[in-house]
Amino acid sequence: MLSIPGRPVRTCEGVSRRELMRIGGAGLIGLNLPDFLSMQARAATPAKSEPKTSGRAKSVVLVFLQGGPSHIDIWDPKPDAPANIRGEFKAIKTKVDGIQVSETMPMLADQMDKITLIRSMSYTPAGLFNHTAAIYQMMTGWAPDKVSPSGQLEPPSPRDFPHMGCQIARMMPPEGPMLPFVEMPRPLQESNVIGKGGAAGFLGKAHDPYRLYQDPNKEIRLDDLTLRPEVSPERLKDRFTLLKGINGSMKELDKAVNSYALTEYYEKAYDLVLSGKARDAFDLSKENDKVRDRYGRTTFGQGALLTRRLIEAGTRFVQLNWPAVANGNPEVDAWDTHAANFGPLKNLHCPVLDRGLSALIEDMDQRGLFKDTLLVAIGEFGRSPKLGVSTSGNTNSPDGRDHWPYCYTGVIAGAGIKRGVMYGKSDAQGSSPADNPVHPTELVATIYHALGIDPEMEILNDLKQPRKLVEGKPVYGLFT
């Protein structure tokens, strides 16, 4: 199981979001979630000057392949390049004439007519050669300001820029009783730096994602969204009705000063817990075996299926992380293929990615979810075109590939994105963009733009200094 256990923690920044969601029997009506909802609204209410959400997208799926998968060996094969660049895998045709992918992705090849391949993702490192800093940039749309020469960062801080999902959930809360932002099945992590770029930062912990750090291929425990056994739904309803009656009999002044006065936040908490909508979305037993098998009985595959269910239930932003530490062991679970590239990709990672991602694309398209859901699948960078070289100071085996931020590939689909095309292209060796380079911050800006959120809107950082929402500008050429 990939669950990362933890006890309730109070820090100098306040209680964590997960602690705030430990509900069932606590307080007057058995909930402490209302306090969280109230704090969330007070923490960062959008300014009146912020633009209305008029984009085609209403929700976002981010499939984040932390660890940096090799673009040449997956999305952007180079069959005519020298052997020490093209590697061991052959290129295969896809459903779209003129676009090839690696033989490691046969199922995705059949879904190519539904997506755009961005083969010109690129940035020049500025202390961003390692995973953590690159992840922070991809999640927030901002380069970190404190980076060691190796690219390592400080641990997560309340001064960090917010994850884009936190901003999106703040500006576009769900229309019904549903979790706004869910991250699973494990945190963003490189070595002992855990969660950098994956939190609300200076927005405050009330805007952190709901973190399901469990293996969705196993039984999921939802203690945070479940009443304690001694508090039945009927008992909670009785308490809610009583409290509502007390609140209605109060004078306005009493309501303003009484900490137990019923507010809209209690109502939201009540709805979230008793509606069962969130719990039902997490219940994969409601899917038939054929569907579950199509996604693959793996942590990633069942996570992809759970992602689709959460979007259907009304979650605004779902982030499905590759279920491995970014710099983990490639022979077991990681994309960080310094020591070995071809064996792990062929036998472990690509079959799982190919099945799970292609199933998610196919399923979302068939269910009409691409009408207003944006899907992005990407890592923090690619891998070096030449085998066995060192580009980041790491040691690489003769068949290993090092970090390569100068050119890599991302997948994007839905919400007005062109279908069955390639945006940008890499050079003959996959080492740099041949045209239309896309910076990670521009991709983040594109996500905001798809939702109708102005990427250049002004926000205030932790020092109350005005900043743009994101450093980059949208890539308008990706849209129809």
Image: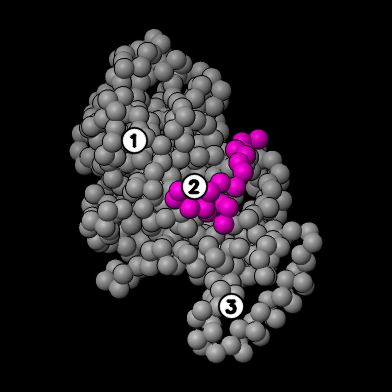
The residue at the point 62 percent across, 70 percent down is 271
Q: Position of residue 164 (x, y in %)?
A: 38, 52
Crowd band around label 3 with a 10 angstrom C-alpha radius: few (<14), some (14–19), many (20+): some
**Do the CB atoms of the residues marked 2 and 1 lie less than 8 Å apart?**
no
Label 1 element class: helix
Image coordinates of residue 180 in percent, x first then y, are 50, 60
Mark with earlier residue (2, 3):
2
For disc 2, the marked residue is 11
Residue 249 painted magenta: no
Front tag of 2 and 3 = 2
* Residue drawn 62% across the image and 60% down it: 278
Q: Which residue is mark 3?
A: 262
**Residue to which mark 1 is pinned:** 134
Residue in the image at 38% along x and 31% along y:
131
User: Residue 249 occupies which quadrant of the picture?
Assistant: bottom right
| Category of crowding for the residue at label 1, using alpha-carbon neighbours closer than 10 angstroms: few (below 14), some (14–19), many (at least 20) | many
- Residue 475 lies left or right of residue 112; in this view the side is left
Identity of the residue furthest to the top in this view: 398
Between 348 and 328, the residue placed more toward the observer is 328
> Which residue occupies 40% across, 59% down?
168
Q: CA distance from mark 1 to mark 3?
A: 44 Å
Position of the C terminus by quadrant: bottom left
